[in-house]
Amino acid sequence: MLAVDLIVALQVSEGRIEELHDTLRTLREASLQEPGCLDYRIAQGSQSANRFFLLERWADADALFRHEHTQHFLDGVARVRACCESVDLQPIAWLLE
């Protein structure tokens, strides 16, 4: 099976950057312990401190499916949505790799 790559763009609500950062750090640490999690990166926008981006790589669709049903994911997503004005998740396909 092919690896699954995701980019998640987050627009953080005013005054909630630190809360989001802590939540994302916790999500990352737990996710990297899961079988099938190949990479989980967090970035903050250089032009806007209220923009965050996640780059996730999963071994296959089954690994991502299992991840999306873990308690730490469900709890983390609820906390992320509470901190953000918008969340945009995009599965991606690399053109050149």
Image: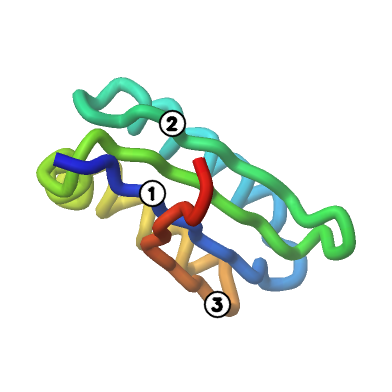
Q: Are marks 1 and 3 in contact (CB under 8 Å)?
A: no
- In the image, residue 71 above or below residue 51: above
Q: Which residue is mark 1?
A: 5
On screen, residue 95 versus residue 46, left or right, reads: left
Tell me which label, 3 or 2, sits earlier in the chain. 2
- Structural distance between the alpha carbons of marks 1 and 2: 9 Å
**Nearest the camera: 19 or 8?**
8
Pick the quarter of the image with the N terminus.
top left
The label number, if any, that marks residue 39 in the structure image = 2
SS at badge 3: strand
* Crowd rating for badge 1 (residues with CA inside 10 Å; few <14, some 14–19, many 20+): many
Tell me which label, 1 or 3, sits earlier in the chain. 1
- Find the residue positioned furthest to the bottom: 85
On screen, residue 95 versus residue 58, left or right, reads: right
At which x and y percent is residue 78?
36, 62
Q: Are marks 1 and 2 in contact (CB under 8 Å)?
A: no
User: Of the residues shown, which amino acid type is indicated by label 3?
Assistant: Ser
On screen, residue 96 versus residue 73, left or right, reads: right
Judge depth for marks 1 and 2 and give the one in front.
Answer: 1
**Nearest the camera: 62 or 76?**
62
The label number, if any, that marks residue 86 in the structure image = 3
Q: Residue at x 21, y 51 (%)?
A: 68
At which x and y percent is residue 96?
52, 48
